[in-house]
Amino acid sequence: MARKTHRPDDILWPVTESAFKAVRDTSSDIVTLGAVLDTKYPRKAMVKLFDEKLIHVNGHKATPHTEVSIDDEIWIAMAKEKIDHEPIAMDLHILYEDDDLLIVDKPAGVTVNSKDQVSLANGIAYYFKEHGIKRKVRFLNRLDRDTTGCIVIAKSGLAQSLYQQQMDDNTFEKWYMAIVEGIVESDSDSLVLPMDRSIDGIHYEVNSKGKDTRTDYTVLHRYPNGTVDNSVYNLQNTVDIPRENVDSILNTVDKQGGIVDNSVHNLGNQPCTAVAVRLYTGKTHQIRVAFSHIGHPLVGDTLYGAKFTGEPFALRAMKVVFTHMRSGERIIVQA
């Protein structure tokens, strides 16, 4: 049964004159709700919400063909869902949260989602249950078991669709910090490489038959003697986020009270390089494959040719930048 009252996470907005004029057919005075929604939201997400009778105009259930006028109120109700993973208590480090997104700092040694073992998804399900968030767990990005940092969870199908669209058009920025073997000579580069799963089914490789990927990097520091200060804060502020596509205020969200890795890795006399990486595509193992291909595998990443160190490979999802789906502000979240 459709709700008759608003909840705090519902979306309410009036039909503005500019939105009305943007979709008005010059041969007709009629503007439909579907046409207005097409200017703001992915149609696939809207179809599901219409099917569930969760979209209203002026308090009444509506269809895509409902006629709308300037100042009509559109109400998109956020549906309750059954949590789709077993809730298991887990010590989560929350980096950012609003009505639509949850971003946590994933530790090393934990899978994002696994059917045969406890994973981060179980911890998120427990957090949702304890905070009265009756939604499925929807991950917007994936990190390997030993990769740490920003993992993004959408709280609704609509949020998932909107932020996935930002990822598809590269306005949702994903930044990483990695330590790679050897001294990388170029200060920066864009690695555009076709990748596909290898014949062994375990790792990925550069293959002309694969899909194109793009991995951009900038050198942060070169360590000729192999001693690496791994403090996250020592490196994160050296990365300059390009300001193209930013039309409004940038809000930076810093994690509070977190455990900062201030350890020093002594790799003997093995030279290495710290790099900031931005992904424009999302292929499995993309960063690991790209740097291995140019002769600089991630330190400790034996699957892709690195020397054994006894420690997890050095890769951290250190920053995400996105446009808030309700306010339109650009938000920076740092791990």
Image: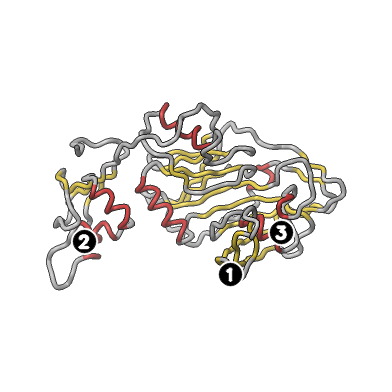
Please indicate whether residue 173 sits to the left or right of residue 296 in the image: left
Q: Which residue is mark 3?
A: 292
The answer to the question of whether label 2 and label 3 lie on touching residues, with beta carbons closer than 8 A, is no
Q: Position of residue 198 (x, y in %)?
A: 64, 60
Residue 7 disc label: none
Please indicate whether residue 92 sits to the left or right of residue 133 in the image: right
Residue 209 disc label: 1
Mark 2 or 1: the one toward you: 1
* Quadrant occupied by the C terminus: top right
Please indicate whether residue 152 sits to the left or right of residue 109 in the image: left
Alpha-carbon neighbours of circle 3 within 10 Å: few (<14), some, or many (≥20)? many
Tell me the residue at 65%/55% (across/down).
203
Please indicate whether residue 144 sits to the left or right of residue 303 in the image: left
Q: Amino acid at mark 3?
A: Ser
Tell me the residue at 82%/42% (across/down).
266
Tell me the residue at 74%/47% (across/down).
300
Task: Return the disc, 2 or 3, that comes first in the chain's sequence.
Answer: 2
Tell me the residue at 22%/49% (across/down).
74
Q: Position of residue 73 (x, y in %)?
A: 19, 48
Mark 1 or 3: the one toward you: 1
Task: Return the disc, 2 or 1, that comes first in the chain's sequence.
Answer: 2
Q: Position of residue 328 (x, y in %)?
A: 38, 52
Q: Which residue is mark 2?
A: 20
Q: Amino acid at mark 2?
A: Phe
Q: Amino acid at mark 1?
A: Lys
Alpha-carbon neighbours of circle 1 within 10 Å: few (<14), some, or many (≥20)? few
Front residue of this view, candidates 327 and 142: 142
Mark 2 or 3: the one toward you: 3
Determine the CA span between mark 2 and mark 1.
46 Å
